[in-house]
Image (cartoon, helix red, strand yellow):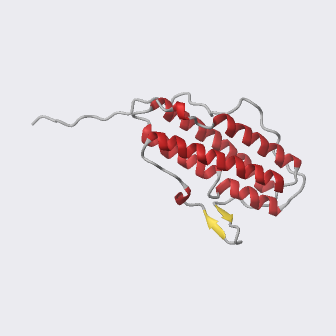
Amino acid sequence: MQDTTTLQTESCSFAGIRPVMADLPYPPIQVSAKNPAFASLLNIDYCGSVSELSAITQYINNENRISCEHCSLAKTFLGIAMAEMMHLQKLGELIQLLGGSVSYASRQPNGHMRLWTPEYLTLPDQVGKMVAANIEAEQAAIQQYQMHRKMIRDEHVDAVLARIINSRLYASPRPRDVD
């Protein structure tokens, strides 16, 4: 009996992928003083519906689903996810320094804590819609960071948030990235 199965192989090599971000240093991770209210705001950026955790998960999911047919875009998504991981790490350090606790729950406007959930993600099947959803998520994150910069009155935290915004502007996928 002859084996008629066809071996499926992933041909997109992710060797050497680097974070997609502006080649600029981050400011030192420091705060003027402990402030749990500021930590709570950053926790929204860490793991809320619009957050680094959501961005990482959405980019990785997209990358996994398109790597066979759209290798160069999959590499871009992975590089952006890597940059988002760095943002998550920076936010976690700031939250701790501000006297908060790093977890996967954030305080909602009604005061209740809510665990991060994949329900926060937008995961369309078509590549063009994936790019559009990622662009929309980046824009929402930038708006949220800008709002938090106005609310958090700590020059050190503000500098880190400004750098994260700069990186997000640089790394946002563009519709022309679809191959």
Identify the residue shown where x is 59% and y is 41%. Answer: 81
Position of 67 relative to 95 (above/below): above
Quarter of the image that includes the N terminus: top left
Q: Observer-nearest residue: 126 or 96?
A: 126
Give the number of marks: 0
Q: Position of residue 95 (x, y in %)?
A: 76, 55
Q: Observer-nearest residue: 142 or 106?
A: 142
Classify residue 22 by image quadrant: top right
Q: Position of residue 73 (x, y in %)?
A: 50, 33
Identify the residue shown where x is 68% and y is 40%. Answer: 168
Position of 50 relative to 163 (above/below): below
Identify the residue shown where x is 65% and y is 46%. Answer: 139
Q: Observer-nearest residue: 2 or 95?
A: 95
- Residue lying farthest to the right in this orientation: 32
Q: Position of residue 17 (x, y in %)?
A: 56, 30
Position of residue 53 in the picture relative to residue 142 (left or right): left
Position of residue 150 in the picture relative to residue 52 (left or right): right
Q: Position of residue 145 (x, y in %)?
A: 74, 50
Classify residue 126 by image quadrant: top left
Q: Observer-nearest residue: 124 or 157?
A: 124
